[in-house]
Amino acid sequence: MNMTAVYRTDKQALIELRGVTKVYGSGQAAMHALRGVDLRIDEGEFVAVMGPSGSGKSTCMNILGCLDTSTAGTYWFKGVEVNRLTRNQRTKLRRFYLGFVFQGFNLLNRTSALENVELPLIYRGASAHERRHRALEALRTVGLEGWESHTPGELSGGQQQRVAIARAIVTGPTVLFADEPTGNLDSARSHEILELLNGLNREQGVTIVMVTHEQDMAAHAKRIVRFLDGLVESDKPNIRNA
Amino acid sequence: MLWNTMILALREIRRNVLRSVLTILGIVIGVAAVIIMVTIGGGATVQVRQQIAGMGSNLLMVTPGKRLGPGQSTDNVPFKEADSRAIARDVPAVAAVAPVSSQSIQAIFGNQNWTTQVSGSNNQYLQVTNRSIRSGRQFTDSELRSGAAVCIVGETVIRKLFGGQEALGEKIRLQKLSCEVIGLLAAKGQSTMGTDQDDIVVIPLSTFQRRIAGNQDVGFIQVSVEEGVATEKVQNDIVRLLRERRHLSSSDDDNFNVMDMKEIAQMLTGTTRMLTALLSAVAAVSLLVGGIGIMNIMLVSVTERTREIGIRLAVGALESEVLMQFLVEAVVLSSFGGLAGIVLALTTSVWLAGILRVPFVFNGGIVMVAFLFSAAVGVIFGYFPALKAARLDPIEALRHE
Ligand SMILES: Nc1ncnc2c1ncn2[C@@H]1O[C@H](COP(=O)(O)OP(=O)(O)O)[C@@H](O)[C@H]1O
Ligand SMILES: [Mg+2]
């Protein structure tokens, strides 16, 4: 039974994947990371993605975040067929609609928290004044007021991840992808980050797709998608939160 | 957008001071080395030309032996004094003929000693070398004939051996020969090749042959031609005379050389030109080494920065924006290094030219070439690896360790 059918409405989906595959390498060494993923996500959802390591969660997230391209299948974002976009068009999609939070933070070294958060705004052509204003606001949102001038090396893991989240939300993205955002953090920090994401979803209506290993993290989501061997194994509303 | 990119690039330069300094240093050294070498070499060439122009054009130099080709030369049969006398007697339009033999010898006076060039010749030596006696006198005919122990001494030797003391009438020792100072030469300064022309002692040729060389050979013969006479004519007459005296048949090559000033000048400028070429080659190598240095730093830094490129792409930077940033960075670093190199090179060249006493000759061409080369190296090696990284999918660039 196709679980995604549960969520089908007449409304245009924010994200829709159909038969998406991803093959790394070729010939004998070919590695089928995704084998035909169907997935639909609507605006305002908070989706937790779970599944064993190597099941293709990150691969799928990277494709959704336009950081990577699929081998076959179709990806619609707001009804636009992403597969048919040029490289630069996909970059524009990232620039204006998508935010991405990585497990490994991926902040610029030797660069202050403020400048890290300002980075996406530079490419949006925001004025220096506007950049500063919005970056400070984003840092306030993630609770890092007073840490603006610190470089990643001077911040704890939890703080670095919050800088990364600030960077992802500073542009006001439609959807935020977070690939194991708490994977490198202890349990207390993890809950703080999760609260933050929850707040963004609830108060600002940001669609959130989050990969996590931990059951109690996923418990915050309204919906849980499970991956297994490159396929969506199950896709259920989270009874507690739905 | 370009303004933004400029700011991004400048920020990155400031953030990575060490990397920036190393890159700039490579360019500075490369540019400076080339400019300095070529400027000094060019100065030396100009100096040689100027000095030759001041030497007059009526001088001929007769040397034994002749180069026929690479690694090939005739027997080096030395001249005798009779050859020089024959030239003076039989060749028309000759103003003065000086047979010369010389050797580097230690001169001793009291407890002072000084190694100098001792030449055996006659009074016409002064005429052909365009020198005069400041005080004292020339050799007498009988001194020349009998090989008397007398000498005429240059300014440098007087200073080194006598300090401020009166030298005339004193005896200096040249090997086993103790000879009286009868004349002091007027100072002449440095020669074309940078040798001190006042570091010299002249004694009668016969004295030199008997007491120092121990043979009757003459090293070379200098001839000055009368004013207003074509040197080619005299040159040909001397060649004819010497061929006859050396019993050369018509099929034999000359086994001596008669060069006029033009040829000597050519020889000298040829030497400096070779020197310049050599210096330039060394400079080119240092420019290349500098270039490789820049290349290394740029390659390493781009590898290091592939992740940075990935981050920029991931947050929405276009490939072209990332590349523009790297290009601006490379251009700023390279031109800054290039300009610093030019300034360093020009100040060093002025200073070196002063020390080496060669004129400072500004060569705009080489300044341009050196600058463009290192700028190109900086830009090419800063830009192309970045191009590779910026074309990756963001996730590929981010995965890069
Ligand atoms: N760049 C890659 N090259 C080759 N294989 C890869 C690459 N990235 C991921 N894979 C493989 O694809 C499969 C899915 O990986 P991934 O999406 O990272 O899984 P998950 O995030 O669920 O742990 C794994 O078997 C992994 O080894
Ligand atoms: Mg993963």
Image (tube, coloured by chain):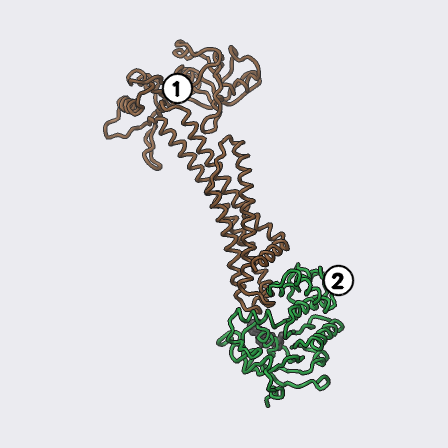
Ligand 2 positioned in quadrant: bottom right
Amino acid of disc 1: Val
Which of the pair A139/B400 is nearer the observer?
Answer: A139
Looking at the figure, which quarter contains the N terminus of chain A? bottom right
Q: Residues within 10 Å of mark 1 (few under 14, many from 20)?
A: some
Identify the amino acid type marked 2.
Gly
Residue B134: x and y in percent read 48, 14
Placement of B51 over or under B367, stated as above or below: above
Which chain is assigned brown? B
Instruction: Name the residue located 51 percent from the left edge and 39 percent from the top edge.
Output: B36
Chain that appears green = A
Task: Decide if residue B176 is in sight here.
Answer: no
Q: Secondary structure at mark 2?
A: loop
* Residue assigned mark 1: B128
Q: Which residue is mark 2?
A: A146
Relative vertical location of residue B206 with respect to residue A19 in this rendering, above or below: above
SS class, disc 1: helix
